Image: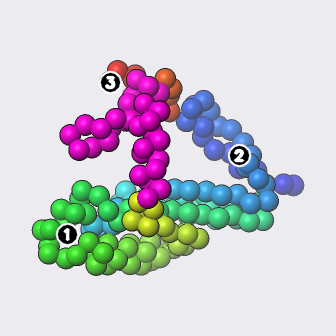
Amino acid sequence: MSKKLFLHNTLSNSKEEFFPINKEHVKIYACGPTVYNYAHIGNARMAVINDLLVKFLRNIFPKVTYVSNITDIDDKIIETSQDTNIPINELTSKFTKIYNEDMSMLGVDLPDLQPKATDHIQEMIVLINTLIKKDYAYEKDGHVMFNVPAFKKYGSLSKRNRDE
């Protein structure tokens, strides 16, 4: 008997069998923590859920690559760095290490790859510029904002009205 995985599809609001794009190599990406402080229950919840899913996938498919990023730059990190007089790279390295240790104590395996946001700034800039050129984003008060009306399907996953 072959093993099957059923997942809740948020878009269709139904349970559906999972069929990977490539059944020989399943790839999964999940957002990881923003590392400016100790992990909280929300961080742990997502790590445990993702870990269970990856372990199940590895039981079914021959190869699974799990990637979960580390957000090591954002407003909270900058603010914490300034408040504590700890350089950003020291602060984020410390809390990345503590996060990984905490998740390990929960029985969560490390992702296969754990890219840091700061290692991909150039790619982010290119993507942001592409979104701006296509009118999916715009600049305002030194920030880049998503242009909600430009994306007709916005809100379909969250079941929210685009005007909210």
Residue in the image at 27% along x and 43% along y = 143
Q: Amino acid at mark 3?
A: Glu
Residue 2 shows in this picture = yes
Q: Residue furthest right?
A: 1
Mark 1 = which residue?
A: 81
Mark 2 = which residue?
A: 18
Say few, some or many: other residues with alpha carbon within 10 Å of mark 2 (under 14 / 14 to 19 / 20 or more): few
| Residue 153 vertical position relative to residue 49 in the rendered view, above or below | above
Of badges 3 and 2, the one in the foreground is 3
Span of residues in magenta: 122-151
Percent x, y for residue 104? Answer: 47, 76
Mark linked to residue 164: 3
Of badges 2 and 1, the one in the foreground is 1
Percent x, y for residue 44? Answer: 41, 63
| Residue 90 vertical position relative to residue 138 in the rendered view, above or below | below
| Residue 16 vertical position relative to residue 150 in the rendered view, above or below | below
- Work out whether mark 3 precedes mark 1 in sequence or the reverse, and give the earlier one: 1
